[in-house]
Image (cartoon, rainbow, N blue to C red):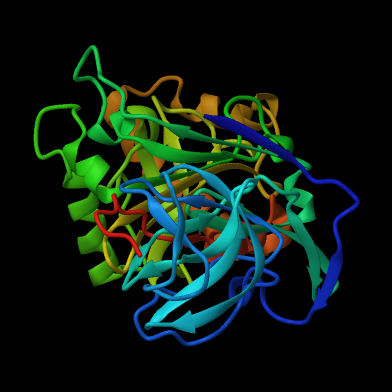
Amino acid sequence: MFHAIKIGLSVAVVLISTSLSAISPAGAQADTCPNAPPASLIVGQSALVTPGVPNNLRASPSKTAKILAAIPGDTAITVLAAPKCADGLRWWNVTDGKLTGWMAEGNGANYSMIPIATDPATVFTFDGVTATSIAFRNIRLTYISGFGKTIQMEVNPVTTPNCICLAPLYYAAYTHFNFSDINPVSGPGPEIYVFASADVTSATGESGNPNSDIIQLQTLLKKRPTSFPLDPSLPLNWGGARTNFVTAARYLKFNSGRGTGLRYLAYISQGPAPILADSLLYSFQGLTDDGRYYVMAKFPILASVLPGKQEDASDFWTAIQNRDDTATAKWLVPYYTRVIAQLTAAPPSSFTPRLDQIDALMQSIIVHYINIRTDWF
């Protein structure tokens, strides 16, 4: 399933003075219903009935009210009015286009309805910067206007591999966001992946423990190291290439404070090469606190403090041309150390996209748990 949202000029602009990481969806209702999960729907926008048994559409907000219809999972509905609390649940006035009634949002930590992005994205400003909030299935995120006008979103199903050449993560089902408008380099664009941890655990891939990536990330987030050696051992190496070094490591909270991830700049290569302005990758790996979702991101970036092209790095090739592999590896250590020092001292404006703006995007991610429902109201 593939979706592309183009940000139009007809949506309303709401002035907000707050930090991006603290932004809630515009129009989201804040109330207290003891047995309900946090409110996630928005009046006037669309939602999706989660998979599982049908959800009851009732004549009034009560578990004993007349059932108008049983709405199947994956049915799109529209939220018409603010919710009401009754019987410990949060009830929303909704329509499926044929009937109008009341439906419970969920019970405990489980949602029976989630927001989806079938409507125009919500555009607003914070501290004078225009931002856009979108929801797709069970995921919401917010990004500044400079991140592009078209965001591609899709859900990829589980893949059956024809080899065991890649990690299990590459074969698991995931939700994918592609910010192709802002790719500063040639090749794959900036991407965010959201996996259900259970899907990663059950995926088939290379031999060994199929959820080793998640276990390794859980350990990393618990220990919270702030510096890493050269050739670090990290949960995932993109495309199986070698990670020569990481720098600018920082821990970020996401999922409304109920998730933690590590962001860093990585230099990944198949062999010795000069590190140019377009050689670095912004990487993020995080887990929701309940362990149910694994969030990964990769954003190619440009670093203006580094040489722009191969011709500007002729001294690199001169230095290694007469060295064998052992001597080259030894020479690379101080070279990498110097580059790391340059990147560490560089301000956020030295990078395109800016690191603090990508951080804000990652911190804005909210993932609602989707379960296969076995109950209804």
- Please indicate, yes or no, whether residue 327 appears anywhere in the rendered image: no
| Side of 299 where 14 appears, left or right | right
Q: Nearer the viewer, residue 13 or 350?
A: 13
Residue depicted at x 25% and y 18%: 161
Residue 86 seen from this side: yes
Asked whether 65 or 352 is in front, the reply is 65
Q: Position of residue 50 (x, y in %)?
A: 41, 50
Occupied quadrant, residue 362: bottom right
Residue 201 at x, y percent in the picture? 19, 43
In the image, taking residue 95 as reference, residue 48 lies left or right, namely left
Residue 63 percent location from the top left of the image: 37, 73
In this view, 171 is above or below 362? above
Question: Viewed as shown, does residue 63 lie left or right of 301?
Answer: left
Number of numbered labels in the structure image: 0
**Residue situated furthest left in the rendering:** 208
Q: Nearer the viewer, residue 166 or 80?
A: 80
| Residue 302 in the image: above or below residue 38 | above
Q: Residue at x 80, y 46 (%)?
A: 7
**Residue at the right extreme, as displayed:** 9
Of residues 28 and 217, which is closer to you in this image? Answer: 28
The reply, left or right, for residue 182 in relation to residue 315 is right
Give the farthest residue toward the top: 162
Q: Quadrant of residue 199?
A: top left
Q: Quadrant of the C terminus?
A: bottom left
Task: Examine the rendered structure and indicate whether residue 176 appears above or below residue 348.
Answer: above
User: Percent position (x, y) of residue 76?
Assistant: 56, 45
